[in-house]
Image: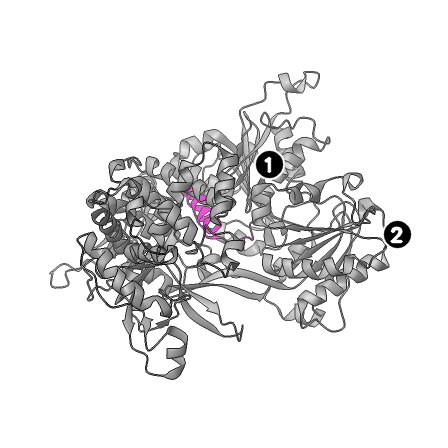
Amino acid sequence: YILKWIRSQSGVKNTNIKSALARILIVRAKTGSEKSTILPVEMHKYLNRFIPANVEIKKRDFKKDDIICTQPRVLTTIFLAKDVSSSGYYKDMVLEKTVGYQTEPNSRKPIHGLLYATVGILVAHMQMSTDAEIIEKYRIIIIDEAHERSLESDFLLMLLKNFYEHNRLIVNLPFLILTSVTFDIQRYAKYFGVGPSNYLDIMGRAYDIETHWPRNGFNNYIMGAVEQIIEIHQNNLDDLPAKADILVFTPGAGEAMAICQELVKKLAQLEKPFLLLTLNREIVAAQRREYHLVFAKPKSLPLVNGHKVVRRVILTTTVAETGLTINTLRYVVDSGWHRSRETYQPWGISGIITRPASQSRILQKKGRAGRLFPGDFYPLYTENTFNTLEEQQLPDIITLGVDPIFLALIAEQRRHKELMETLHAINPKLFPGFLNKEAFRVEDLDLLDPPPPEAFLVANSKAISFGFIEIKNLDRSSSTKAQPFVSLMPLGEVALRFSRVPMEGARILFSGYVWNCSASDLATVVSLIGAQSNVFLSKREMQNKKTFSGSKALLASVSSFLTGIELAEILAFFHVKILIADAFLENLLIFDAFAEQLEDPVQTKDWCENLGLDYTKLVGIANIHETVIGEMVVAELDPFCNSEYKLKLSTKEFFISRLINLKKCLYYGFRGNLLTLTHASNKKTRNQFGIGSCYVTRQGLTVHIPTPLLPELLIEQVRDARLAFADSFGMASSAESRPQWLLTDSLQIVPEQRNEMMYSLSANILLVIDGYVPIDTTFDRPRSFF
């Protein structure tokens, strides 16, 4: 039907809006309908139908018509391309010739043909290419899993809507197909302005899935999952290995580990064991052994307790929620919970929150079974509970805010208005003009869901304070009646070129050119935004109670003149910490020391092991660092600028001045998150935050400092030593053990240890600025105007 529809529309000339939008098709298809594989492959066959069948596949000169099929996750993107090329059903699909994939960390693109890509790849293509280039490159654009409402996905939908609107007179627009299992097709049709003839609801699926609702839900879903897994396994010992596996969805890796630990205890008691595997984002990214065992043939699985296994039990997170086909999967067990990050405005507070999953997410998980044969679904909650859940998850633009795409929204609206105004001059009836064509207006922002006003106002005021945008026509004393409007400033035009760097990170990078800081150092700092202060430490090091976590790594990463004073190792460690007083810069020095070891991977791993560092985490930050460097190049910033000012290369004479300059850059990026020392007025606060002191935000919110800046027993010793230590560097030093002002990259809510239903406000990465940088205590973000 879809091929017939495309053929019927291929010859239509776009003389009006209806004929242009007729190239948009919205398809809702049940899981198992192969919309992610058969649909794009059949599209490729249709475009190349005139190629002689007797020509060897690898020698065929396929047409230059490209199909792009976007996916919400890296795992699914790579898996689908490999699955299509290796299945044997699609002989025309040759990896890196007629089919391939492109994600940010990985790329095996085809010469021409079908490209599976993450959403961000198509967003980048549309932002960096002209409309003519997009029209020439793509014949068909498929947005798979269109119900996934990430910020990038919503922004992509807006880009596509604008693209089809201001190109409605073009004859050969690409076909746009939106597909999903659970989305509201009528809502999406209304958004794109198409009617019933442009959407299709496919109700059937290949195989049935039986749902086994429990009479009563499980209060403890970890133990409930263990009980359910053992029951399924023991009651179905005669299952064929090719139709026996169990997939268990948990909200996070921690819960998966807890279930795993309980199941390990049970395994020793089973006559016929199962193979226990975990699948999460880290395992997938590193392509570890567990990942390959998930898809291995049953005959090749390792023995457990000396016996062949009946099945695999795979504990996973949302990484396996969509697009993943495990050929041997029969059973799905679901906890009913979902974990994601949320941001609360206007305070800019974020946190990882666990909530009941939406019905759409649960149906996606259920659909992992029944792909090649009938399946079974075991929820750990009742049917009544399921019926009370929200149908769809809230989009990220509501739960996270609009900060990451704010500047891009302004630029896209400006571009769209300019194109529409040009067309309006040619044909006023077909192309309506805008009320305020120069102005950025929220009313003209055509997103599927508008962002909350508080989130938009915070992003707007933040951009003003960074010098990225300005408010024009703000002089109310003027005789003109022009309304104030937002406009990008030159600095904002440069910041706009960063797609993976937050506004705070861009401001930090720009400040380095003013304060003569190493651009590479600042790129490393920006790579650490959002990470934890102990991001590089191994689990063993963090659990080591004999020494202070990270002491060996920090002392091994700094210059000898910083540890040259004849003191015990632990005191030297705290001397260095107090002198630097900045978790960002401590991690910068550790990362630079790690980078020096990279010539020999084996030696590097040993070096990390000896210092209590996690090699994988360091490599992960190195990949982010490369991404930041790449974006600096795109923004036409020199990533090697001021390389002679690297903190790692500083001599004793220049170390403090370079340290201060780096702190100035961080201050101008994070000064909206200033924390001020105050004195506690009640016993509860004194116990929580130390002896009679705590920190508050600009809005007066009390912030929990997760670990003391200095152990109480060492305060006197370090205070005396700091005076002598700072004296040797020629810098002033306060005798106050607790700094007056701190900065943090983000404020987060974290569950309290005694009561997980209660949350407290915590700072992420901390840095001390008093004594280093002059503080503007009157600074506040400006008001917003629209």
Which residue lies under the disc numbered 1? 6
Q: Magenta span covers which residues?
A: 145-169
Q: Residue at x 52, y 72 (%)?
A: 753
User: Of residues 75 and 177, which is closer to you in this image?
Assistant: 75
Tell me: residue 765, above or below residue 292: below
Q: Assign a secondary structure to mark 1.
A: helix
- Mark 2 surroundings within 10 Å by alpha-carbon count, few (fewer than 14), some (14 through 19), many (20 or more): few
The residue most toward the bottom is 682
Asked if residue 86 lies in the magenta stretch, the reply is no
User: Of residues 91 and 683, which is closer to you in this image?
Assistant: 683
Which residue lies under the disc numbered 2? 238
The numbered mark at residue 272 is none
Q: Position of residue 623 (x, y in %)?
A: 45, 40
Asked if residue 149 lies in the magenta stretch, the reply is yes
Residue 415 seen anywhere in this rendered image of the structure: no
Q: Position of residue 613 (x, y in %)?
A: 48, 48
Residue 710 seen anywhere in this rendered image of the structure: yes
- Mark 1 surroundings within 10 Å by alpha-carbon count, few (fewer than 14), some (14 through 19), many (20 or more): some
Which badge, 2 or 1, comes first in the chain's sequence?
A: 1
Distance of label 2 from label 1 (alpha carbons): 47 Å
Q: Amino acid at mark 2?
A: Asp
- Picture quarter with the N terminus: top right
